[in-house]
Image (cartoon, grey):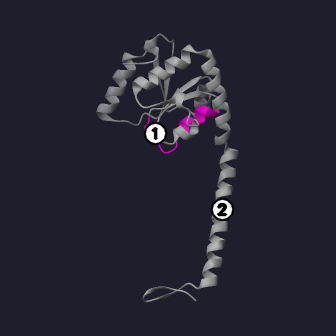
């Protein structure tokens, strides 16, 4: 198994989540966890408070779902101040600000980029400050402000459309749209 830990870094990978897989996949995960128990842990079905504590104690994050629509885990880890590595496709790319130094297209590329960051304190600080700037885009306040802007824009569009229909008529005939 190729990993940043195999590159000589003392790391602990904590997988946070719900243990909802069944059958062969579950057995496979158990074997992987057992084989790598010296550096991989599973924090399953833990409370929200425990999740927050783990996030706040972490410096790095790794997201493995390619093409995910948003990536709440990525946003949460970024809010906690973590440098986060994400697949090059999907919503998490926006969360990390399209930062090429944390985007990967393969396991090998992810390991290479993690290794580069772990070896370079200057790069760590640069990416940490980038994460701090980027995380402000995903606060509750920022999300609410964006929702208000979108709602206002939709209302303006709807009013303009209603005014347009009132001006030009909106009746229907057997052959389609009728203008007044």
Whether the magenta-drawn stretch holds residue 92 is answered as: no
Whether the magenta-drawn stretch holds residue 77 is answered as: yes
On-image quarter of the C terminus: bottom right
Residue 76: name its quadrant.
top right
Q: Residue at x 55, y 29 (%)?
A: 84
Q: Considering the numbered disc 1 on the image, is that residue within a helix, a strand or a loop?
A: loop
Left or right: 34 in relation to 69: left
For residue 12, say whether it is visible. no
Q: CA distance from mark 2 to mark 1?
A: 29 Å
Residue 121, above or below 43: above
Residue 67 screen position, x and y as percent: 44, 41
Residue 79: name its quadrant.
top right
Residue 83 screen position, x and y as percent: 58, 27
Residue 18 screen position, x and y as percent: 46, 35
Of the pair 3 and 116, the residue shown nearer to us: 116
On-image quarter of the N terminus: top left
Disc with the residue nearer the chain's start (2 vs 1):
1
Q: Residue at x 55, y 19 (%)?
A: 117
* Label ID, residue 99: none
Q: Are marks 2 and 1 in contact (CB under 8 Å)?
A: no
Q: Most extreme residue toward the left, as rendered?
A: 24
Q: Considering the numbered disc 2 on the image, is that residue within a helix, a strand or a loop?
A: helix
Q: Residues within 10 Å of mark 2 (few under 14, many from 20)?
A: few
Magenta stretch in the rendered image: 65-79
Of the pair 137 and 167, the residue shown nearer to us: 167
Residue 171 screen position, x and y as percent: 53, 87
Q: Residue at x 54, y 36 (%)?
A: 73
Q: Most extreme residue toward the top, as rendered?
A: 8
Q: Give the residue at mark 1.
A: 89
Q: Give the residue at mark 2.
A: 153
Residue 26, above or below 32: below
Left or right: 120 in relation to 23: right
């Amino acid at each position: 198994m190729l990993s940043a830990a195999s590159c000589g870094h003392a790391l602990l990978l904590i997988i946070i989540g719900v243990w909802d897989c069944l059958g062969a996949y579950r057995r496979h995960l158990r074997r992987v966890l057992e084989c790598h128990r010296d550096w991989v842990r599973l924090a399953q079905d833990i409370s929200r408070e425990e999740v927050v504590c783990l996030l706040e104690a972490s410096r790095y994050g790794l997201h493995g779902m390619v093409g995910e629509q948003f990536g709440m885990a990525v946003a949460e880890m970024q809010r906690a101040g973590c440098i986060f590595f994400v697949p090059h496709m999907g919503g998490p790319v926006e969360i990390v600000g399209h930062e090429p130094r944390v985007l990967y297209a393969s396991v090998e590329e992810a390991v290479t980029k993690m290794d580069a960051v772990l070896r370079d304190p200057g790069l760590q600080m640069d990416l940490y400050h980038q994460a701090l700037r980027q995380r402000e885009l995903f606060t509750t306040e920022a999300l609410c402000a964006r929702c208000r802007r979108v709602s206002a824009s939709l209302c303006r569009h709807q009013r303009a459309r209603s005014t347009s229909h009132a001006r030009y008529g909106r009746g229907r005939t057997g052959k389609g749209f009728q203008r007044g």
